[in-house]
Image (spheres, helix red, strand yellow):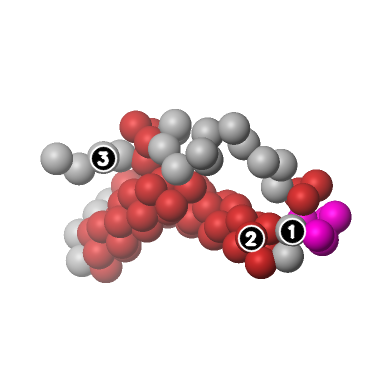
Amino acid sequence: MSKTPESTKDASPVADFETSLDALEQLVEKMEHGDMSLEDSLAAYERGVGLYRRCQQALEQAELRVRLLTDPQDPGTAAAFPASGDDA
């Protein structure tokens, strides 16, 4: 059973990253075969850009969490990544 990025809206950034990356890899593999129409290729490219952006956002969130854990006294980091109540 494979999750789509749309079904992981409430998932953690790590799970969202992994799901989006997997979907992006599958999309690239499909595009590399070269048997898609121009219309399908454009649609796939647009979807790929969206998946890429989701991956970038998840990586940025993970980086902020690491910074917060390694240097909790940095006021810039704390303001950029407010603590959530579900990490207990």
Residue 2 inside the magenta-drawn segment: no
Judge from the rendering whether residue 2 lies leftward or rightward of residue 27; answer left or right: left
Residue 40 horizontal/vertical position (percent): 32, 47
Q: Which residue is mark 1?
A: 72
Q: Residue at x 37, y 40 (%)?
A: 5
Mark 2: give few (<14), some (14-19) or many (20+) Cα within 10 Å. Answer: few
Asked if the residues shown at circle 1 and circle 2 are in contact, with their CB atoms under 8 angstroms apart, the answer is yes
Give SS at disc 2.
helix
Instruction: Name the amino acid, label 2.
Output: Leu
Instruction: Name the amino acid, label 1.
Output: Pro
Judge from the rendering whether residue 86 lies leftward or rightward of residue 82; answer left or right: left
Residue 8 horizontal/vertical position (percent): 38, 36
Give SS at disc 1.
loop
Q: Which residue is mark 2?
A: 69
Q: Is residue 13 above or below residue 33?
A: above
Q: Residue at x 67, y 41 (%)?
A: 83
Closer mark to the observer between disc 3 and disc 2: 2
Residue 66 horizontal/vertical position (percent): 60, 62
Asked if the residues shown at circle 3 and circle 1 are in contact, with their CB atoms under 8 angstroms apart, the answer is no
Residue 37 horizontal/vertical position (percent): 28, 52
Q: Toward the viewer: 71 or 40?
A: 71
Instruction: Name the amino acid, label 3.
Output: Lys
Judge from the rendering whether residue 3 lies leftward or rightward of residue 63; answer left or right: left
Q: CA distance from mark 1 to mark 2?
A: 6 Å
Residues in magenta?
73-77
- Point out which mark residue 3 bears: 3
Give SS at disc 3.
loop
Q: Residue at x 44, y 33 (%)?
A: 9
Q: Is residue 43 above or below residue 60?
A: above
